[in-house]
Structure formats: C-alpha cells, structure tokens
Amino acid sequence: MTTSVAEILATLPPDEAARLRFVLQRGVKLPPQPRVLEALRRLINRREFDVRALARVITQDPGVTALLFKAVKSAAYRQHHPFERVEQVIHALGVKEAFNLVQAVVLTSAIEIKSNRGVLESFWARSQAVAQLAMLIAADRVSVCNIFPDQAYLAGMFHDCGVPVLLQRFPTYCQDMQLGAAGRWVDLQEEDRRFNLDHCAVGYLLARHWSLPAFICDAVRSHHDMASMGMHVSRTMVAILQLAIELYCREQRLANPEWPQVEAEVAAELGIHADALPEFIDEILERFHEQAAAML
C-alpha cells in the first residue's frame, strides 16, 4: 500500500508542501510500487508471516530474487552464509528486514527510461555500490548507531532515486547535468537554476509514496544538508550515507567536494575518533573488495 501524494503534502509545513506541489505540477510522476511489493505488503499487513508464502511471492519474480541474493551476499550477513533459498533469507534476517531489502532491489526496475540507458545503468551501479558500503558501515557501527544493515541498504538505494525520475521527465536533464561525463554527478545549485527543483525533494516524495520508514525518507531529503539536521536517527543515517559516498568516490578515484565539509561531523555522529577514521575506512573498503570478489 502506497501513501498518496495528498497525504504526504498534508503532513508537511506549508512552504515545503508548496515546493513539492510545484514539483508535481512540472509533470514529475512517481512510479508505483511493483506488484511483488504490493503482494508482500498485503501479507505483512495481515500479519501472515508464513515464510513459504512470502518466499513464493518473491520467487515469482526471478529478477527480484537474483538481486535479493546479490544483496545478502554482503559481508554484513557473513554469519548467515551461504544462502541457497529465499526461505533461508527470510528465516535468517526476519520478515521486516527481508522486506526492506526487497523494497531496495525492486527500485531498479520501477523506473523505465527509453533513452540514456547507459547513464541509467551507471546510476544503478553507483547506487548499489553506495548501498553495499552503507550496509557494511551500519553492520560495524550497529551497537553505536542502532541502524541495521537492511535499513542502510534501503537508504543507499533510495538516496539519489530522484535522479532517474527527473531523467524520465526532462529529456535534457542528462545533458544539462553532464551525467554522461566520467566522474560527474549532479550539482545541486545548477540543478535548481535550470529546473527550479532538486532530486532530493523528488527522492523524498518517492520514498514517502512507497511508505519507507520516516527516518529514511528524511535522510533521502537531507543527505546533502547534514549540518541543518537535529540530533536524531535521520542524521545518523545521513552520516552513514555520506561516508559510503566518500568510500565509493575513493574506490572510483573521484573527487568528492562535500567530504571535507562533513568529515568531522560524520566521524562524531558514528562514534569514530578522527584519528581512527582512516583505519576504519581501510577496513570497510577491504571488506567491500572481499565481498565484490565473492560475487564474481
């Protein structure tokens, strides 16, 4: 069951609601949840937690099943390896956790774009890498941050989901944002100047529309604006995302101009001493590399 746009706007301050209403008036359309999610949500809302029934719903979609198995190959779940059946995944992780992972992986097939397919494939590869890194960070810091790997993976997949929605709506978006150029990513100021909207707001609407947890929706909305956030779980989720993005940039040898501005805040939020941060980064990247090798 999705949350209607009217319901979302009714919960927001008037100025924020007006800005998001303007986004929708520009013809931006939010993709509906795929059928597999609707079927799973119906079972869960009826508190029908029969693992076999839930697994049958998931395995009806081979693409979702394959992506789910890829997600749970993460080192974050190494104590449960190997997974051979979807029932094992649900048993080991729990219904809510498995549902979060399914929500994350189905996003890649929910937004269809006829042009710029290469850019879209690169976008999802980036999102999946950030999500996997966020999962590893959360698994390591769970006792401090109380954010779990499935939640971090979900946030990682959705954090920039406004970008493909805008690619779908505006034919010139890819060219204007130079997304096809190596090492380029969306410049928020340029995005606002050219389109008078930003992908964070669009991503927030989509996350709310799909009824993601509120703190993940807020993290999607503010993942480029950590300094403005109060001390709550959404801020912690943003800290995990920011560190995951930095690790992705290091892995790809890309510049990340945001990192120097947020590095100290991220380390403090995650309970990592500044002197220990380089070693922590090396450890997470090492696990990420091991994980990538295991998936080959």
Image (cartoon, helix red, strand yellow):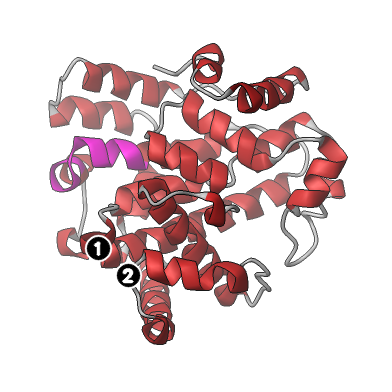
| Kind of element beneath mark 2 | loop
Q: Earlier in the sequence, mark 2 or mark 1?
A: 1
Residue denoted by label 2: 271
User: Pointers 2 and 1 in contact (CB under 8 A)?
Assistant: yes
Is 23 rendered above or below residue 184? Answer: above
Residue 148 part of the magenta-drawn span: no
Residue denoted by label 1: 144
Tell me the crowding category of disc 1: few under 14, some 14 to 19, or many 20 or more residues within 10 angstroms, Cα based. few
Q: Is residue 179 left or right of residue 216?
A: right
- Seen at 47% across and 51% down, the residue is 156
Is 137 rendered above or below residue 39? Answer: below
Q: Position of residue 1 (x, y in %)?
A: 39, 16
In terms of image quadrants, where is residue 137? Answer: bottom left
Q: How far separated are the C-alphas under marks 2 and 1?
A: 7 Å
Q: Position of residue 180 (x, y in %)?
A: 79, 56
Between 135 and 87, the residue placed more toward the observer is 135
Q: Is residue 62 left or right of residue 192?
A: left
Q: Which residues are magenta?
A: 90-101
Which amino acid does the dot numbered 1 rest on? Val
Residue 95 part of the magenta-drawn span: yes
Between 8 and 171, the residue placed more toward the observer is 8
Is 12 rendered above or below residue 222? Answer: above
* SS majority, magenta: helix
Q: From this viewpoint, is residue 110 visible?
A: no
Q: Position of residue 202 (x, y in %)?
A: 63, 33
